Amino acid sequence: MKRIIILLVFCISCFSSCIITQEFTVNSDLTARQETTVDLSQLMAILGDNDTLSLQIDSIFSANKEKYSDNDSLGYKDVEFKHLENGILKLSYNIPNFEKYKDGMQVSVKDKKITIELGDIAKYFEQLKSEQYDFQSTSELFQYYLIFNFDKKIKDVDGDNVGSFEIINGGKTLKFGTTLNQFPSKAITINFK
């Protein structure tokens, strides 16, 4: 996740919109799959055929590809990076045990609930806010979607400062859609039926 934030800083420095979607599909046996998509297509459309920008994106992409590899201590494996057309980057990997996943969040499972501490992710966003950028005026240009898909129905979601969310897909998907300025900074508890 830290490396994805590098792309966000790049977007801020270019004062253009960026959409980051991080999606987790969690099975009842706690195996999971994570896919993150960084959409810089609007930036690419504004700048047109810009070789310098393409080289910068390729450079960031290559550096992240080398740094992101299977990592047992963070709880993921089978890492795939794809640099799609028009400034869309995709990172995906398998998570053998969602409860042991530690890249930007801490997960605990008890009975019919999963608690997700978003502390590390929220810290990265707070750090961005404290940087030299005029974050207040540019934060609306960035959208971050955090999506959790489950194979059972969600009863409700608890937590302080959880931002805006919706339960969709027949009650099995929790989708947080937010600008970075409104990102949840506390634990989220997902209760199941």
Image (spheres, rainbow, N blue to C red):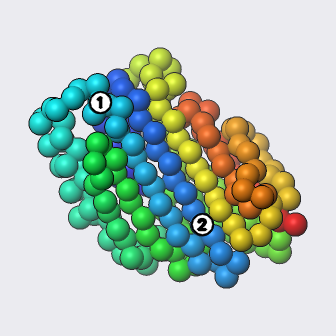
Residue 117 on image: x %, y %: 64, 56
Give the quadrant of residue 39.
top left
Image x and y of residue 41, in percent: 34, 37
* Circle 2 or circle 1, nearest the eye: 1
Which corner quadrant of the image does residue 182 belong to?
A: top right
Instruction: Specify the quadrant of the image occupied by residue 154.
Output: bottom right
How many marks the image carries: the answer is 2
Residue drawn where x is 47% and y is 60% of the image: 35
Left of 105 or right of it: where is 162? right
Helix, strand or loop status at disc 2? strand
**Residue 13 visible, this angle:** no
* Front in this rendered view, residue 119 or 36: 36
* Labels 2 and 1 touching (C-beta < 8 A): no
Badge 2 or badge 1: first in the primary sequence: 2
Question: Measured from the top left, where is residue 174 in percent x and y?
Answer: 70, 53
Image quarter where the N terminus lies is bottom left
In the rendered image, the vertical position of residue 140 relative to residue 22, given as above or below:
above
Q: Residue 25 carries which label?
A: 2
Q: Residue at position x 71%, y 43% from top?
A: 165
Measured in 3D between alpha carbons, the distance from the residue under mark 2 to the one under mark 1, in whole angstroms, is: 31 Å
Residue plotted at (34% across, 51% down): 89
Horizontal arrangement in the rendering, residue 65 relative to residue 49 (left or right): right
Against 115, is 18 above or below?
A: above
Image coordinates of residue 9 in percent, x first then y, are 35, 36
Task: Name the amino acid, label 2.
Answer: Thr
Q: In this view, does 189 lie to the left or right of 106?
A: right
Q: Is residue 58 above or below residue 190?
A: above
Out of 132 and 23, give the one closest to the viewer.
23
> Which residue, given by chain and number where applicable, does mark 1 sit on?
45
Amino acid under label 1?
Ala
